[in-house]
Amino acid sequence: MRDGREPGPAEAAETAETAETAETDRGPGAGLLALMAVMARLRRECPWDAQQTHESLAPHLLEESYEAIDALESGDPDAVREELGDVLLQVYFHAEVASERTDGTGYTIDDVAEGIAAKLTRRHPHVFSDVSVSGADEVKLNWDAIKAAERQAKSGGPGSVLDGVPFGQPALALAAQLQRRAERAGVPADLAVFDVPGETAGADGVARAERAGGADGVASAGGAAGAGAPSELGAELFALVARARAAGLDPELELRAAARAYRDRVLAWEEQARSR
């Protein structure tokens, strides 16, 4: 939020113009200053950039994130650097849009950076305070405990271990995140197993519970706590996610690997078809 630390529109424009001429200054942060200058000018002079909102930009943030993941999987450092730049652009763009609000809810890229710096400091007391840890596992436990306390303070109540899980993410990633959160909170594993119409909790139900890592091989009642039963296919997919996690695998990455392998097969088939 603008509170005297940030320049007004006129000063910001002047600062941007000055920064654009300082391209020879390659000290730390010079690239970020260049991005600030470019974005300030685009918001003033480009009709497309000037009309963008958080809502219109949201799909681009998702798309650029996926492209960054593709680059990481490719192992090409130049591609990774470029795609991370596209993600950074989206982050900065959202902050720039927010900084222009005049209703008292605005914030700047500095506010965003200060917020995440404060969060990292708060969640790493073994680095920034006098807490001792035995290793990475204890760091994770502390992180989860601090995060739970933050959720409780924010909600004013005990909250839920599932608070903050984004349901807009891909379904496989969503299922895995829900299961991870629940597992860390000590939720019984058999809650990940659903009874669906047309099935019984007999031998097949026990088998499904075991496949999902259910406690004592007991199938969960599909209507527990008011939960609606999914389709048979949905229940099987959810159980497959649990199987992958039990094997130490990321179901999203495994499916992506299978998709890439299938792509390679199709490409090879097309190449053979063309050579006939």
Image (cartoon, grey):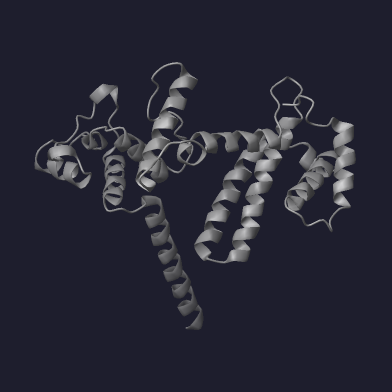
Q: Is residue 118 toward the left or the right of residue 229 in the image?
A: right
Percent position of residue 34, x then y: 79, 50
Residue farthest toward the front in the current orientation of the protein: 130
Query: How many dots with numbers?
Result: 0
Q: Residue at x 75, y 26 (%)?
A: 101
Where, quadrant-wise, is the N terminus in this rendering?
A: top right
Residue farthest toward the top in the current orientation of the protein: 156
Q: Residue at x 63, y 45 (%)?
A: 60
Percent position of residue 202, x then y: 9, 38
Residue 265 appears in which quarter of the rendering? bottom left
Q: Residue at x 28, y 40 (%)?
A: 235
Determine whether 128 is above or below 258 in the image.
above
Residue 44 appears in which quarter of the rendering? top right
Q: Is residue 118 toward the left or the right of residue 233 in the image?
A: right
Q: Residue at x 26, y 37 (%)?
A: 192
User: Depth check: 263 or 243 in front?
Assistant: 243
User: Depth check: 8 or 267 in front?
Assistant: 8
User: Depth check: 217 or 84 in front?
Assistant: 84
Residue farthest toward the bottom in the current orientation of the protein: 276
Residue 3 appears in which quarter of the rendering? top right
Percent position of residue 242, x then y: 28, 45
Determine whether 196 is above or below 88 in the image.
above
Percent position of residue 209, x then y: 18, 41
Q: Is residue 96 toward the left or the right of residue 261 in the image?
A: right
